[in-house]
Amino acid sequence: MEKTSIHGMWSSRTAFILAATGSAVGLGNIWRFPYLASDNGGGAFVLVYLMCIAFVGLPILIAEIMIGRHGRRSPITTLVALTRETGAAKGWISIGWIGIVAGILILSFYSVVGGWTLHYSWLYLAQLFGGARITDPGATFDALLANPWELAGWHAVFMGVTVGVVGLGVEKGLERAVRFLMPVLFLTLVALVGYGATTGHLGKAAAFLFQPDFSKINAGVMMAAMGQAFFSLSLGMCTMMTYGAYLPKDISIPKTAGIVAVADTGIALLAGLAIFPIVIGFGINPNGGGPGLIFTSLPLAFDVMSGGVIYGLLFFGLLFVAAWTSSISLLEPATAFLVERVGIARKNGSLLVAGLCWLVGLVTVFSFNIWSHIRLLDRDLMGVIELVANDTMLPLGGLLIALFAGWALKETILREQLAGMPAGLFTAWRWMVRILAPLLVLMVLLNVVL
Ligand code: PHE
C-alpha cells in the first residue's frame, strides 16, 4: 500500500502544481526580482539569475520534492528516517534545522512586506470611493515606513490571514481561490506590459533587463542572484520538501518541477517588463531602486492611466494573494514539525510559529524608522536578515540537499522516485546534484567570504 502523509495529501497533479507554483510565485517575483535587478546592474544580474535557476535551482527543486515524497513527513522527521534507512551520517538532519530557522527569518520580513501590499490595496480601495489620490508615491511610501505602528498593524493582519489558512490544514477554499486569482494576476501583469508598450519605453526596459554588461558581474551580484534563485523557487528551506511529502506517488516529479520553474521565472521576467517601462517613462533612474521600487514607481502610472485606480487595486490586491500563498508555505514546515514532534494541534502550532515570526518581524519594522540608524555590513537591519537568510542559509541548505540526494541516497530510491525520467536526463540530473550545483553554490558563497 502507498505510504501517505498524516498531514493530508494533494488531491491531484493540478493541486500540487497550484500549491507549489503558489509557493514559488510571490513577492519574490514581483517585488524582489525587479528591485534586485535594479540594484545589481540589470542584465548582468538577470543573466546570472537565469543560470542559477537552470543549473542549480531546477535540479535542487527535483531533489527536494523527491526527498519529501520518499519520507512523507515534516523535513526533520523525514531526514531522521532517511539517514537511518540509508545509514548516512546524522549530520544531514541539520538540513531540516537550517530550514526551520531560515523559514522563521524569511517569514518575519515577508509578512512585513505583505503588509505593504495590504496597505496599498486599502489606499486604492479608498480611492475608488473618493479617497485621496497618490500623487507623490515616494512621500506616501516614506510616510508608511516612518510609522512603526501602522507597519506592525498590517504585518499582524498579514500574519493573521496566513495562520488562518495553515491552521485549517490543506486548504480547499484557498485552492479554489488561487485557481481563479493566479490567472487574473497574470493577465494584470500582461496588461501592464501592454501599457508599458504604449509609453514607448518597452524596448529600453528590455535592453536594461536583457543586455548584460559583463563588467558589472562581481561577487556581490552573484550572491544576490543565487540567493534570489533559491528564494524565488522556495528552495533550500525544506518548503518544497514538505509539499513533496503530500504528493501522490504516480505524479512525475521532473515534469511538475519543470512547470513550476518555468512559471516562476516567466512571472518574474514579466514583472520586470511591466515595471521598467514605467520606471524609465517617468524619468526615474532604473539603477538602485531599492525595496521601495514597485511602491514608488507603479502608482505614478496608476495615477495617469485610464482606469488606473482599478489597476492599482487589482495589482496590489493580487500581489497580496500571491504573497499569501507563499507565506502559508513558509509557515507549513515548522508547523508540521510541531504537530509531529510535540503533538500540538495544527491550529495552535501555526499560531505559535506565526507569533514568533511576528515578533522577529518587528526588527524589520523598526529597521525603517526607530532603528534606521543601525547599519551592519553596509545594510539596514532588514538587509542583514535578507543577507543571512536568503543569500546565505538558503544556498547552504540547498547545497546540503543536493549533496544528500546525490551522494547519500541509494540509487534505488532515486530511480523509484524519478521513475519515467529519460535515462539521459536522469544521468544529467544526478551529475548536477552531485557536482555542478554544489560547486556553483560553493563558489558563490566562498567568493563572498574571501
Ligand atoms: N518563493 C516565494 C516568493 O518568491 C518566497 C518563499 C521563499 C516561499 C522560501 C517559501 C520558501 O515570494
Image (cartoon, rainbow, N blue to C red):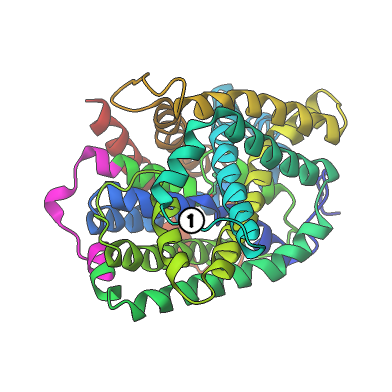
Whether the residue under disc 1 has CB within 8 Å of ligand 1: no
Secondary structure under the numbered disc 1 in the rendered image: loop
- Look at the magenta stretch and give its main secondary structure: helix
**Stretch in magenta:** 206-222
Image position, residue 401 (x, y; %): 51, 39
| Magenta span includes 211 | yes
Q: Quadrant of residue 73?
A: top right
Q: Residue at x 41, y 76 (%)?
A: 195
Q: Nearer the viewer, residue 306 or 36?
A: 306
For label 1, count other residues whose C-alpha is less than 10 Å away and answer few (under 14), some (14-19) or many (20+).
many
Q: Which residue is mark 1?
A: 134
| Magenta span includes 209 | yes
Image position, residue 418 (x, y; %): 59, 59
Image position, residue 257 (x, y; %): 55, 61
Residue 384 in sight here: yes
Residue 331 drawn above or below residue 51: above
Q: Residue at x 32, y 76 (%)?
A: 199
What's the residue type where badge 1 is placed? Ile
Is 95 left or right of 449, judged from the image as shown? right
Q: Nearer the viewer, residue 427 or 429?
A: 429
- Report the number of discs: 1
Residue that protrudes farthest toward the left in the picture: 215
